[in-house]
Amino acid sequence: MSPEILPVYSFIENWRNPKGVRSVIVASVVLLLLTTITGIVFYTGGTSFAWLHLMYMPIIIAAVAFRIRGGVVTALAAGLLLGPHMPLNVTQGIPQETTNWAIRIFFFLIPAILTGLFSGWLNKQIDIARQQSLYDPQTNLPNYLSLLDFLENILKKPAHLRGRVSLAIIIISNLQQIIDTLSYRSNNVLSRQIAERLRTLAKPQLKFYKLQSNILAIAASDIELHRFIGHCHQITQNLKNPFHFEGIPVIINMHVGFFSNEDNGETADEMIQKASIAAHFAEEQNLLYTSYNKSFDNNSVKRLSLLGTMKEALTADELLLFLQPKVEIATKKIIGAEALIRWLHPQDGLLSPEMFVPEAEKTWLIHPLSLYAIKAGLHQLQHWKKAGRNLKLSINLTAHNIQDRNLIAELIRLIELYNIDAANLEIEITERSIITDMKTAADVLHSLKNIGTLISIDDFGSGYSSTRYLQSLPIDTVKIDQSLVLNLLSSSLNTSLVKNILSVARDLNMKTVAAEGVESQKIFDTLGEMGCDFAQGYYISKPLSEMEFNRWLDNSHWKD
């Protein structure tokens, strides 16, 4: 609603059905008009003059405010005030005939009744429209406007009277997958089932809302945060039980973000925003629960701002190729590098890919961004070839890239255009990009393998870690996740996991490489003793610009 309309809307809402003090004010205004107009009629000469028609004003006001009853009472009062005791002509002392003022009362009653009927009908329509605007039509749960209204009514109270205000936002992250599998009708059916289950879990201090098709909210006031989180935990545990659509059991995947107002001056809208930010962070990190942290907000605003300027960055040569060396552990020989993109932002300096790639992957910008990385990497391979260096280069492709057949076709075309030996190019993909769509991933990887490129699974051990796709897909290398490598010396569990990964890789005749986690000679030597083939990490070198990397090659103690 626009700011210009809000004052008018607020006025109508406050006075269309006056109660309490407002009803007294309206009644007083009607009474004042009745007496004033009676006086005007008398002092202007009586009922034979046109001033008596002013009486329709208080009659209509009363009918609008108090419906038929108010209009009828006011019409009768107006008729009697202008009735037997009001002369037809004051100056000449001519009285009214009874039929004269009786008929006038009849004519006063007509607009009173009609206005009262219309006012009642109109207010009923407004109430229906308001009800529809405040409730979700599918589930009849209160919606975003209801939540906003609830929070605003609480927050306008003094802090010592309202207590703590808590809010939880629940994101159902797999709703689109359910719709794609079971049709859009499943969304309506499941939404109603979720609403019914929430109603069975209702508690006096908790209020449930549906904000969007896949977003729910739970709000409460004057309740301790740990109790509120406990209630929300019980609710989400119950929602984990299967729902059903046409006999098919359906599980919903949830992520919950909490925010609690502690009299920091947040508005209702800001509370909803912060709880939503926490929920989206939980979704990104694959967490069930998380509470709002200011760093989430700063990062999300910053990343959204960066996304808005990324198109210009692609054309302004602000993106840079960085390279991190890889070394063969047994021979201590440099075998290649991983290509990493950095953004030299004019205001924020050098930005790591974590600041902009995840957001870009949600938009069409991931295509030109990935294409830049491919071209820059192939150009570097071409440079090494001309310099007589037989080095391999790894380029990362996202889950979105794997589904983009046009990008893959362009990659194959560019390999031929740059006259690169495809065996020196390694494509790194994550486990998630395979699991997202196994068939498409298999088709793409086989097409790349057919031209001679190497295929590597990045961050192995951080997620699904299924050996099934290691056997069925043309994978050459497994990169052990850095979280396992960083704590290799201090965690017996990590040591066991790394040994198992190495054992599986050997059984499948694969090479293995420790990811960005080799930060000491001790870890480097331990990996070598375990049978790991390659290493990458800060012990060898941090990521370097192209110029720095080529200079490092010339002066490094590692063998080239």
Image (spheres, rainbow, N blue to C red):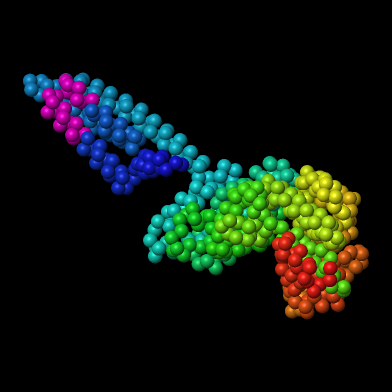
Considering depth in this image, is 497 or 331 the residue closer to the camera? 331
* Rendered view: 363 above or below 68: below
Q: Is residue 354 above or below residue 105?
A: below
* Left/right of residue 408 with respect to residue 279 in the rendered view: right
Residue shown at 17% from the left, 31% from the top: 38
Q: Quadrant of residue 394?
A: bottom right
Main SS type for the magenta part? helix
> Residue 465, how many percent across, how many down?
80, 63
* 402 in relation to 9, above or below: below
Q: Camera-side residue: 278 or 139? A: 278
Q: Is residue 117 left or right of residue 81?
A: right
The boundaries of the magenta stretch are 34-53
- Residue 508, image x and y in percent? 91, 64
From the top left corner, tell me how far across and down residue 216 is, in percent: 59, 52
- 170 and 86: which one is in front? 170
The answer to whether 182 appears left or right of 209 in the picture is: right
Which residue is found at the position 84% from the left and 73% from the top?
332
Q: Residue furthest left?
A: 92
Say whether residue 109 is magenta.
no
Residue 321: name its quadrant.
bottom right
**Number of marks in the rendered image:** 0
Is residue 43 in the magenta section? Answer: yes
The residue at the point 43 percent across, 60 percent down is 265
Q: Is residue 532 visible?
A: no
In the depicted structure, whether residue 129 falls above or below residue 157:
above
- Residue 84 visible? The answer is yes
Q: Residue at x 66, y 51 (%)?
A: 317
Q: Is residue 266 left or right of residue 50?
A: right
